[in-house]
Amino acid sequence: MLVGVISDIHDNIWVLDDILAELGDCDVLLCLGDLCAPFTMAAIAKGFDGPVHFVWGNNDGDKVMVTESASEAGDVTIHGILGEVVLDGRLIAMTHYPGMAKALAAGERYDLVCCGHSHEREQIKRGGTLILNPGEVMGRFGVHSFAFYNTETGEADIRELA
């Protein structure tokens, strides 16, 4: 199974559209917070053709309307500040916060722990756990990035939007 991973959109829906097109072969999308406005949730739900799992970031605004947009989309699950999913036998944790991700990974319970917040692309292997930060959709630091995670191989690939 191929899993798309994005974070820190900050309402840059123009780049988001391009990244969602790149993630078109993915079976599932993990969104790690800071989408910001409800219209961004609607754009994710419309632009991705599979289940979406979302955790809140520190810049997510109107949670009521974001939740309503997710509900209208039908295949979006909002997990709160911490999410846990099993995909193709892989146990995956999701949070916006790198500190929380590192703490979760320390127990080596998870195959994959995903985080955002720092806007910096990173993969760290801690024992049997991979910590993955896909970077930022927004492009604040000049690079728009996203990641793929392959549940069969347990490997991730961070890519920059060309």
Image: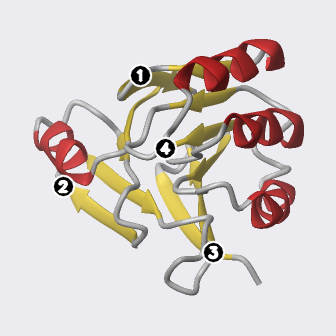
Q: Which residue is mark 1?
A: 80
- First in sequence, mark 1 or 4: give its number: 4
- First in sequence, mark 3 or 1: give its number: 1
User: Are discs 1 and 2 less than 8 Å apart at CB?
Assistant: no
- Percent x, y of residue 7: 53, 53
- Percent x, y of residue 89: 49, 24
- Percent x, y of residue 110: 29, 34
Using the image, tell me which numbered label, if any, was put on residue 126: 2
Labels 2, 4: front one: 4
SS of the residue under disc 4: loop
Image position of 151 with respect to 120: above or below: above
Say which quarter of the image contains residue 91.
top left
The amino acid on which the numbered mark 3 sits, given as a three-letter code, is His
Question: What separation in Å lies between label 1 and label 2 (alpha carbons)?
Answer: 25 Å
- First in sequence, mark 3 or 2: give its number: 2
By what rule are the colours in the image chosen? Answer: secondary structure
At 50% across and 39% down in the image, what residue appears? 60
Q: Which residue is mark 4?
A: 32
Question: What separation in Å lies between label 2 and label 4 (alpha carbons)?
Answer: 20 Å
SS of the residue under disc 3: loop
The amino acid on which the numbered mark 1 sits, given as a three-letter code, is Gly
- First in sequence, mark 2 or 4: give its number: 4
**Could you tell me which quadrant the N terminus lies in?**
top right
The amino acid on which the numbered mark 4 sits, given as a three-letter code, is Leu
- Classify mark 1: residues with Cα within 10 Å, few (<14), some (14-19) or many (20+): few
Q: Which residue is mark 3?
A: 144
At 77% across and 54% down in the image, what residue appears? 23
At 56% across and 29% down in the image, what residue appears? 62
